[in-house]
Image: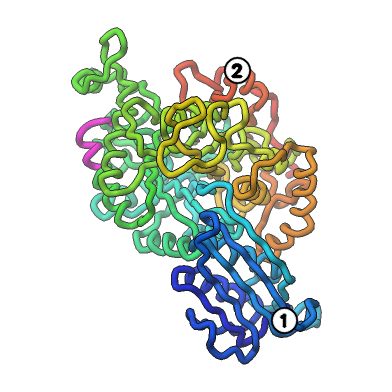
Amino acid sequence: MLLEDGARVGTDPVLRPAARWWRHVTEEAFGLDLVPSGTDRGSDRSTGQHVDFALAPDLPAGGYRLEVRPTAGRPEAVGSVAGSVRVDAADLAGAHAAAQTLRQLAGPAAYRRAAAAYSGSGIAPLELPAVRIEDHPRFEWRGVLLDVARHFLPKHDVLRFIDLAAAHRLNVLQLHLTDDQGWRMQVHRYPELTRTGAWRRESTVGTWRTGSGDGRPHGGFYTQDDLREIVAYARDRGVTVVPEIDVPGHVEAAVAAYPELGTRKDRQSVRTTWGISQDVLDPSEGSLAFFRHVLDEVLDVFDTPWIGLGGDEVPPTLWRESPRIVERARALGLLAPDGAPDVTQLHGWFIARLAEHVSAAGRRAVVWDEAMSPMLPRDVIVTSWRGYAQGAAALEAGYDVVMAPEQAVYLDHRASDHPLEPIPVGFLRTIEDVYAFDPLPAPLSAGFSPVQGPRTGRKSSTQRTVGRLLGAQAQVWSEHLDGARRVDYATYPRLAAFAEVVWSPRADREPGSAASKEFLERLERRHLPRLDAYGVEYRPVAGPHPWQTRPGVQGHPRDLAAETAVGGWAGLGGWREDGGVENLPEQDHPAQPDPG
Ligand code: ACM
């Protein structure tokens, strides 16, 4: 059907944000004036056309039914003027998903910001095929992490990232706001966090092992008004923003601002290199109070149910060297089996105290898997990144889990072994590899149901109480992504593959499978034109455009087979006493040839 000026858009009040969003993008792209008509579906239908968003509680959570119909008695063909669109949605999330489907059905032109005349043929009409679709998501947490700490992304780029994530029906954005290399959130009580901590002297270009400084200051931060806008913009698209304040490691920017937070107490500058820092928080009462205050402002700005506390990569080296901190571990009763004080437990202890603070505010903390300890409150959500085994263990221990294994869904990792792949780091993860991602592979799911469970702890088939597999999350870390164009390149089109995996039913998506081939074909024929119309500078399937390469900049590829052979489902990533991945032989991978 062709939708025309004056078509009425009615909605149940609960679904209004989704209907309004669809109206806006559609009006913009097709130059139409659609008429909101509230819930009054009996109102003037002079064009005979109406689009209705209605609640249908019988549908599964996040699901929708969508029907595009020509008016009765008229031919179904293109050109039938009157007609109707009916969206039945289980809830607002379902209406958002349906609205994205409506946009998809309208073709690539629907992803443009203005109605354009194509080759003299006039403005593209909004033409919707007659369809009936019923769909619902496999997982309730379909996430993507954006690291704005390593490289600051201006607010408009964050909004654009959200818009694109929503277009792929992802519904969680974890915003990694703090790290060694930068603090990005304005905190009124502690202004030095952004005055000092948001800026670094320079950035390392390429891997920290061989890279050199670019000699150019870098930084930026979001005001609380910026962040409130980001939250609202995301909400308008069905995306929940999960802020992440990473502690007690990855804190050099905060320590640069407030040296008393650090273990060494001496003034240091915001870190300019990548890699794991030894400079972790002093796990003192003072540090706890400081971060409780920070979290109070985070809780105020972000109305989300989930608050990220980080907890990854915390070397206890400096704690061990501090008699005061060793004594603190003893005083807190954090003891090894032989009765000696065990400073490594301060990591879990510190995170547990902050998680309780979040919980007392009626929210749930989210932590990386290293923060799991017997002290971690059961309401905390564990994000499994070093591998799959940590997530399976957390489920067994009764935690709700988001799977984000670096072996599969780190999109900053290299997309190919192409000789011109820009700054190739991490594991080789092609589009097909990402499409084959299974959040809980069969060998690990014995004893669990691999689908999301009910809202409370449940008994597995072996009668253990297990947590729920909430879903999965792709990560876009930005050490080597110094702007929106690089973020586009790393993220797309692989995020489209990830999005399909977390939305659609489980299937055999192994590279070479029928599903994988069909996806690749559909990606190239149907989806890349949408990304082109939107203006996404994705990585072409055949390899980078010449201007997307970074000649002469050294990466640090890792060998997935070698690491899996040693680390198994747990992987070798993160900080490890035995040096972990750093003990593996280096791959021979020269920097790209410099054509200049
Ligand atoms: C992580 O990649 N350090 C969570």
- Please indicate, yes or no, whether residue 30 appears anywhere in the rendered image: yes
Residue 346 placed where, x, y %? 30, 26
- Residue, x 54% and y 48% (percent of image)? 142
Q: Main secondary structure of the magenta part?
A: helix
- Please indicate, yes or no, whether residue 491 appears anywhere in the rendered image: no
Q: As drawn, is 265 to the left or to the right of 465? A: left
- Note whether 80 is above or below 296 in the view shown: below
- Note whether 180 is above or below 238 in the view shown: above
Report, in whole angstroms, how far the alpha carbon at label 1 lies from the one at label 2.
Answer: 64 Å
* Residue named by callout 2: 566
In terms of secondary structure, where does tag 1 sit?
Answer: loop
Quadrant in the picture for the C terminus: top right
Q: Which residues are magenta?
A: 282-290
Q: Quadrant of residue 415?
A: top right
Residue 90 placed where, x, y %? 52, 61
Q: As drawn, is 265 to the left or to the right of 147? A: left
Q: As drawn, is 130 to the left or to the right of 159? A: right
Residue type marked 2: Val
Circle 2 packing at 10 Å, graded few (<14), some (14-19), many (20+), is some
- Residue, x 55% and y 23% (percent of image)? 572
Q: Is residue 288 magenta?
A: yes
* Residue named by callout 1: 72
Labels 1, 2: front one: 1
Q: Quadrant of residue 281?
A: top left
Residue 86 placed where, x, y %? 61, 72
- Residue, x 34% and y 21% (percent of image)? 344
